[in-house]
Amino acid sequence: MWAGMTAAAFTVPTRYWHRLDDGRIQCDVCPRACKLREGQRGLCFVRAREDDQIVLTTYGRSSGFCVDPIEKKPLNHFLPGTSVLSFGTAGCNLACRFCQNWDISKSREIDTLADAASAEAIADAAQSLGCSSVAFTYNDPVIFLEYAIEVADACRERGIRAVAVTAGYVCAEPRVELFSHMDAANVDLKGFTDAFYAGTCAGRLTPVLETLEYLKHETDVWFEITNLLIPGLNDSEEEIDRMTTWIVESLGPEVPVHFTAFHPDYKLLDRPRTPPETLIRARSIALANGVRHTYTGNVFDADGQSTYCHGCGSRVIERDWYRLGDYRLDADGRCERCRAQTPGVFSGAPGSWGARRLPVRLSSA
Ligand code: SF4
């Protein structure tokens, strides 16, 4: 069915847009609000105006598939130790100068995306590979939400959960639709100032905070937050203090926060790698402000990557990068020692996928 399909076969109509008085059509998927004339593409590059409507041009197309540990998304409180089938498409609706997936997010080579796959084929592959979930990752599912939703539904029909890895830069109406099909999310909170969002990502902070509040207060989606710390740009103690204070006050103490290390990439090559001490310091600030579960990522720090019971303080999940060690939670996520509930989604014994990364071609899955 998919072999030899033309670009038109991967193009579908969308519904979040409206006409402007000057003849342009505005896309209403994300706050960028691209205003397009016939034949133009939005900033994300995958939504375009064709035949006098906004279409998605990457429906059923992927930049590749890989089986990962769920901890790599990162999600530390969602079916620990299990494997997730990860995939993405092309394009992005932000323009982060430090993008660490820029070959995908900035891809203009949509016609040469490696794999084409129906939702059913992806769900079948996830099932046959023994994955507990499928993740829309590498680039943001917001821009390919019609495809992501169909894949999520096909997976959920088979008991496989759906995970969005997103920057949360989405308008209110599509936000509701996208997350109503998701079981979990990792939301990238890139900084806590408008200046950082505007100058480094070509975006705004407020819509991302609105997404976080929406997820917490109006959905059952389990979500965790990632904050990539870049030396000199968004890593001041004052900014981390304000961010984590806002998280506790607005979202509560139970939302896990991951501080991860930057490495020079894409257009941001003049900054050094994030020192481990910066992440350890950020984690200390978060803990002092009341965040119960906070982690360091992309560095060697087994203490900062393990999970501790908020009731008795004992280590309940030993974690080193993506590998689990000693595990002290019962099947429902309660501490074996004090019975306090660790927040998250737990189902029986932890998985045993380990730290493996397994690239797959769907035809051979
Ligand atoms: S989803 Fe794409 S086309 Fe639509 S507003 Fe955002 S960047 Fe523009």
Image (spheres, rainbow, N blue to C red):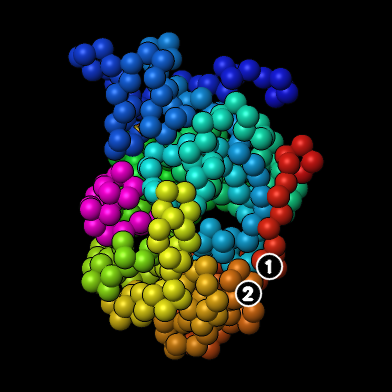
The disc at residue 58 is none
User: In the picture provided, is 29 more to the left or to the right than 352?
Assistant: left
Q: Is residue 153 magenta?
A: no
Provide the residue designation for mark 2.
324
Circle 1 packing at 10 Å, graded few (<14), some (14-19), many (20+), is some
User: In the picture provided, is 52 more to the left or to the right than 87?
Assistant: left
Dot 1 amino acid type:
Gly
Q: Quadrant of the C terminus?
A: top right
- Which sits in the foreground, 209 or 131? 209
Secondary-structure class at tag 2? strand
Q: Earlier in the sequence, mark 1 or mark 2?
A: 2
Secondary-structure class at tag 1? loop
- Which sits in the foreground, 100 or 83? 100
Q: Quadrant of the N terminus?
A: top right
Task: Tell me: residue 48, above or below residue 346.
Answer: above
Tags 1 and 2 in contact by the CB under 8 Å rule? yes
Q: Is residue 190 magenta?
A: yes
| Residue drawn 58% across the image and 71% down it | 321
Task: Tell me: residue 322, above or below residue 26.
Answer: below
| Residue drawn 56% across the image and 49% down it | 135
Instruction: Residue lying at the far front in this picture: please name it.
Output: 270
Q: Position of residue 282 (x, y in %)?
A: 36, 74
Dot 2 amino acid type:
Leu
Provide the residue designation for mark 1.
354
Question: Is residue 59 in view?
Answer: yes
Please report the bounds of the magenta region as a residue range.
188-206
Taking the image in four quarters, ligand 1 sits in the one at top left
| Residue drawn 47% across the image and 29% down it | 46
